[in-house]
Image (tube, rainbow, N blue to C red):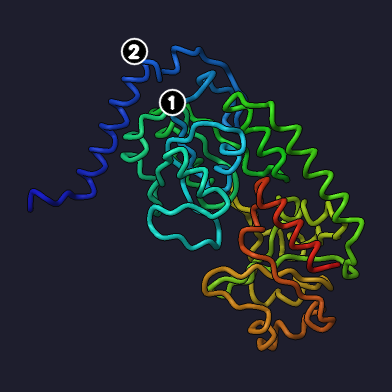
Amino acid sequence: MSAHRMTARMRAAVALLIVAVTATAVGCGTSTSDEAADTGTRQVETAKGPVTVPADPQRIVVLNGALAGYLFDLDAKVKAADPRILGVTLASGEFPASWAADAKEQGTVAVPSGDDLNLEFIAAQKPDLIIGGGPGWPGQQTIKNYDKLAAVAPTALVASDLANWQDQLKAVADFVNRPEKVNGMITAYTDKVAKVKSALKLPQGAAAVWQSQADGKPILLAPNTPLATLLTDVGITIDDKIEAKAGNPPRAAAGDWVTFSPELVSTVVDAPVLFVIKLDGGRDIAQLKQDPAMAMLPAFQKGQLYELPATAKRPDYREAMATLDLLAQRFK
């Protein structure tokens, strides 16, 4: 075997060694200025129960792009961030537009994405706090690898079933001991909701959100998830019987969607209003209209079809405000 190649077993051994060395260093502690021991610790409630974290973390690694924006809003110090946002295509090392400037200003580095977490990279950042959990596949990855992450640094997971960005923000703010901006951000959103809602001319009937993706699988956004809650805030009635009509299929802990058999499309997608979120390779509304099975659905028959960008599906504070602007323009 070439000296420049490593087997999967060898790479795994190296990863575990790095994790073990990092955990030992954290446990022993030093007197350097960036150590959590210099500022003390505090206990926070997480999706995995109480966790002791630095009182003033200096090297945060956040492993879900849906949560990273909150850290920049809170002026937390982000050493590395997973850039993945559903439906946003990025080149290697790039960050989503909504917080790319903040990441550049802080010198934040991008966490490599893959089917598994890159534990070697995460450990090499010498984090004093790891933040994960939250919605989607990145959230599932951190749940699956929680014990390994906790061996590197204190790991705080955001609950994956939080129904709105406000609760996600509160959790992240608690983890990093930055509560002072939370109320102001929530108030700004509430005020904007009231202003937008008062001027909207909304379509009639309940609504569902269709996720259009390359594999063509029928997928609807689950009720009581962040975008569904935002739409409800402005007066749109979300179909809350989607899962029952789909036969209550199992949903992953960090999943915010409902997938079902194509044979059930006419039963499950019977809401008279349909929002469509197109992911890479998915069909837009014009293309969906060419599908006979879709064209017969009530929303298509009534012409009550509306596109939303992929960034709206799991809105943080910034994307929630941007989505309100989009709705204000669309339904004025």
Q: Residue 15's x, y, as percent?
A: 28, 38
Which residue appears at 67% of the width and 84% of the height? 286
Left or right placement of residue 188 versus residue 49 in this view? right
Q: Residue 3's x, y, as percent?
A: 8, 48
Left or right placement of residue 220 versus residue 114 in this view? right
Q: Is residue 27 above or below residue 195?
A: above
In the image shown, does 213 or 73 lie closer to the viewer? 73
Residue 262 in view (yes/no): yes
Residue type, mark 2 in image? Thr
Which residue appears at 35% of the width and 15% of the height? 32
Query: Which residue matches tag 2?
Result: 30
Q: Is residue 105 above or below residue 182?
A: below
Left or right placement of residue 115 versus residue 318 in this view? left
Q: Which mark is residue 128?
A: 1
Which quadrant of the rendered structure holds the C terminus? bottom right
Helix, strand or loop status at disc 2: loop
Residues under labels 2 and 1: Cα distance? 13 Å
Which residue appears at 61% of the width and 39% of the height? 70
Image marks 2 and 1: residues in contact by CB distance under 8 Å: no
Q: Residue furthest left?
A: 2
Q: Residue 251's x, y, as percent?
A: 62, 54
Sequence order check, earlier mark of 2 and 1: 2
Q: Is residue 291 above or below residue 6?
A: below
Residue type, mark 1 in image? Asp
